[in-house]
Amino acid sequence: MVCPWCGSGRVIRKGKPYGKQRFYCKNCGKFFSENPVKRRCYLNEYKIKVVKTAIRIGISETRRIFGHSTSTIYQWMKELHEEIKDELDKIKKGKLRRRY
Ligand SMILES: [Zn+2]
């Protein structure tokens, strides 16, 4: 267990006031409960929206709009490959139709 406030590992258990384990950080003197820091986690729907935008208007534009890094967007593209396949097909077909 690591303190979410200061990142210190000097943490001790300090009672269960509401049935939830409470911890106390000896380093900064703050209390916190179990699993307080969740990694910023995005919903799939949101990721799909970002990825689809990237496909349509390009990654650098998307990065500017949503504020995610290029590597994050690429990561999501890989992750959501199945979900965005239809979208990719549509765009490919659209481009083909336009070109020929
Ligand atoms: Zn601390």
Image: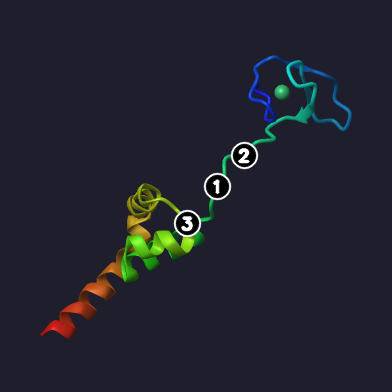
**Which residue is labeled 2 in the image?**
38
Q: Position of residue 91 (x, y in %)?
A: 27, 74
Measure how far apart labels 3 and 1 are at the Cα level: 15 Å
Q: Rounded to the nearest whole Å, what is the CA distance between mark 2 and mark 3?
A: 20 Å
Kindly identify which residue carries mark 3.
67
Q: Nearer the viewer, residue 84 or 8?
A: 8
Which corner quadrant of the image does residue 6 belong to?
top right
Instruction: Tell me if 66 is positioned left or right of 58 in this view.
Output: right
Q: Amino acid at mark 1?
A: Cys
Q: Earlier in the sequence, mark 2 or mark 3?
A: 2
x, y percentage for residue 12?
Answer: 75, 15
Q: Position of residue 18 (x, y in %)?
A: 87, 33
Mark 2 residue element = loop
- The residue drawn where x is 34% and y is 58% is 82
Badge 1, how many Cα within 10 Å: few under 14, some, many 20+? few
For the residue labelled by badge 3, is the local secondary structure a helix, a strand or a loop?
loop
The residue at 34%/55% (across/down) is: 77
Q: Quadrant of ligand 1?
A: top right
CB under 8 Å between callouts 1 and 2? yes
Rendered-image quadrant of the N terminus:
top right
Q: Amino acid at mark 2?
A: Lys
Q: Residue at x 43, y 61 (%)?
A: 64
- In the rendered image, the quadrant that contains the C terminus is bottom left
Residue type at tag 3:
Gly
Circle 1: element type: loop
* Discs 2, 3 touching: Cβ within 8 Å: no
Pair 2/3: label in front: 3
- Measured in 3D between alpha carbons, the distance from the residue under mark 1 to the one under mark 2, in whole angstroms, is 8 Å
